[in-house]
Amino acid sequence: MSGTEMGAFDKCCHKLNLPPQEATHLDFLVRKSRYQVLVYDENQSIKPTDIPASKMKAILETHTTIRRELKSQMRCQGGGDFMHYIDDIFSLRNPTYQSFGDYDFKLYDNPNAMINYICCCDAKEDLCRTLAGYSWEWVSKNGGNKPDIDLDGKKYFWNKNSSQWILYSKPQEIGCVHTSQGYDLNRVAVILGREIDYDPATQSIVIDRSLFFDSKVKQQTTDIQLKQFIINAYKVMLVRGIKGCYVYAYNKNLRDYLKQFIPVVK
């Protein structure tokens, strides 16, 4: 939060007799309402300021609670099987190769071909966008004319707007998890950035902290925590598309790993 927001937060804590260093907005909700309906998924946590699973568990254990598990979702036409498949791929569970009916799921070797395809789809059916991990600095943030991202010699800008970017943007712009979380797209293309790779020697996903530029996510996180936040962010982005999902991995080792599970567009 900004300084002004922190000041307002501390005032609320004082009024509710809560310690500012330990309290969360969830504590505010519990103190000021008789009933709460909470929807929570720890696998969608993408930054240190999210409500941690331990906090949610503590709230549930100290109140009379009815718990229900949401076993299906209506966003992605790939269905629950696709959601589990994405999770298995990034959890290194070596899932059996699957297809998902009419749901279009493809891996690209050429990032510019993928972005061109998304632009064509957007012209036909709207709400088709490209998203990426935050592994390129946002040099155009303050209105600069220098592009942010270089993909095989072609330059792109990060999202020009932070608020409602999906509704008021051009498909050539590239968004991130913060501008897409909670939105539905007809089709989504996701660039797995420079910071995430696959190590074939250890058969593990690896993260390069120096190539990740979201300072608010990096702040006060261990390498293990940062890795989980980054993987969670990609999983969130990969399930934004209702009709299709297209993937490009910047690093070849990761791209080769994904080829075991996703059909390739040359």
Image (cartoon, helix red, strand yellow):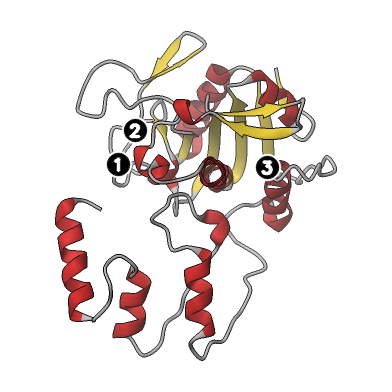
What's the CA distance linking mark 2 and mark 1? 7 Å
Q: What label sits on residue 162 in the rendered view?
A: 1
**Mark 3 nearby-residue class (10 Å; few <14, some 14–19, many ≥20):** some
109 left or right of 88 in image: left
- Residue at 67% across, 52% down: 83
The x and y percentages for residue 166 are: 38, 42
What's the CA distance linking mark 3 and mark 2? 26 Å
Residue corresponding to mark 3: 90
Q: Amino acid at mark 3?
A: Phe
* Cβ–Cβ under 8 Å for marks 1 and 3: no
Residue corresponding to mark 2: 159
The x and y percentages for residue 194 are: 53, 24
The x and y percentages for residue 11 are: 16, 71
Q: Nearer the viewer, residue 176 or 74?
A: 176
Q: Closer to the N terminus: mark 3 or mark 2?
A: 3
Quadrant location of residue 67? bottom right
Q: Nearer the viewer, mark 1 or mark 3?
A: 3
The secondary structure type at the circle numbered 2 is: loop
Q: Which quadrant holds the C terminus? A: top right
* Cβ–Cβ under 8 Å for marks 2 and 1: yes
Q: What label sits on residue 61 in the rendered view?
A: none
Q: Residue furthest top?
A: 153
